[in-house]
Amino acid sequence: MSKKINIVVGFDQRESVAYHTFTQSVIEKASLPISFIPLAINTLKGYEETHADKSNDFIYSRFLTPYLNNFEGWAIFADGDMVCQADIKELWDLRDESKALLVVKHEYRTKAHRKYLGNINEDYPRKNWSSIILWNCAHPKHQILTPDFITNQTGKYLHRFSWLEDSDIGELPIEWNWLAIEYPENKNAKLIHYTLGTPCFKDYRDTEMSDIWHETQKRIVDGFDK
């Protein structure tokens, strides 16, 4: 029985408030101790980000999660642009030793071909599968995921989990990666993903389900009402 949940979280200085808002939302509802690793590029010794087609600083470094956990045990990777509305232990309890990893297997076409900071938002196979990953870090097929290997792989290869067979990839319930704006509004989603733009950006400040993000962010500054 695991006594601690390991979570690797995407971090980009341009939206650092997103990281802190997400971790706040996890801590508020967690029933087990949490260990967070922010994927801040300046802390990833031995990894050089050379990809030119990146929309954020952790688009490729997320695949270092097994390496950062010494290829041992389990870990969760999560984009920073999320809010957790349930006990993260519920996600943790979905671990399946027969799988190399588990993801929400989205099948959708985007409503917007531009997203935050003017980044191009293209449709592609397995889009957003890698935004929340329940990693079996000890799975032998992940041993290739070293800093040098990831530096030299394409986004297509990595985000489609091409080092795995389809049977190695387990499926999570869609409520654990609910795409704001792209999907119908769902206030009861366990994990809301502001994939087109975190409400910290002015263009997304008042978009669908942004009120949930703002309420969480406000508690970081003001605490809970007494």
Image: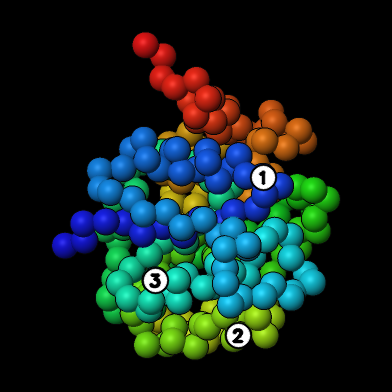
Look at 49% across and 29% down and name the residue there: 220
Q: Nearer the viewer, residue 63 or 148?
A: 148
- Within 10 Å of disc 1 (Cα), the crowding (few <14, some 14-19, many 20+) is some
* Helix, strand or loop status at disc 1: helix
Pointer 3: what residue? Answer: 69
- Image location of residue 93, percent across then percent down: 26, 58
Q: Which mark is residue 103?
A: none
Query: What is the CA distance from the residue labelled 3 to the residue labelled 2?
Result: 16 Å
Look at 25% across and 48% down and name the residue there: 32
Q: Is residue 139 above or below residue 45?
A: below
Q: Amino acid at mark 3?
A: Asn
Q: Earlier in the sequence, mark 2 or mark 1?
A: 1
Query: Contact (CB < 8 A) between labels 3 and 1?
Result: no
Query: What is the CA distance from the residue labelled 3 to the residue labelled 1?
Result: 25 Å
- Image location of residue 66, percent across then percent down: 43, 74
Residue 65 located left or right of residue 28: right
Query: Contact (CB < 8 A) between labels 2 and 1?
Result: no
Q: Amino acid at mark 1?
A: Glu
Pointer 2: what residue? Answer: 148
The mark total stands at 3
Query: What is the CA distance from the residue labelled 2 to the residue labelled 1?
Result: 27 Å
Q: Which mark is residue 15?
A: 1
Q: Nearer the viewer, residue 149 or 176?
A: 149
Residue 110: quadrant of the picture: bottom right
Residue 154 located left or right of residue 62: right
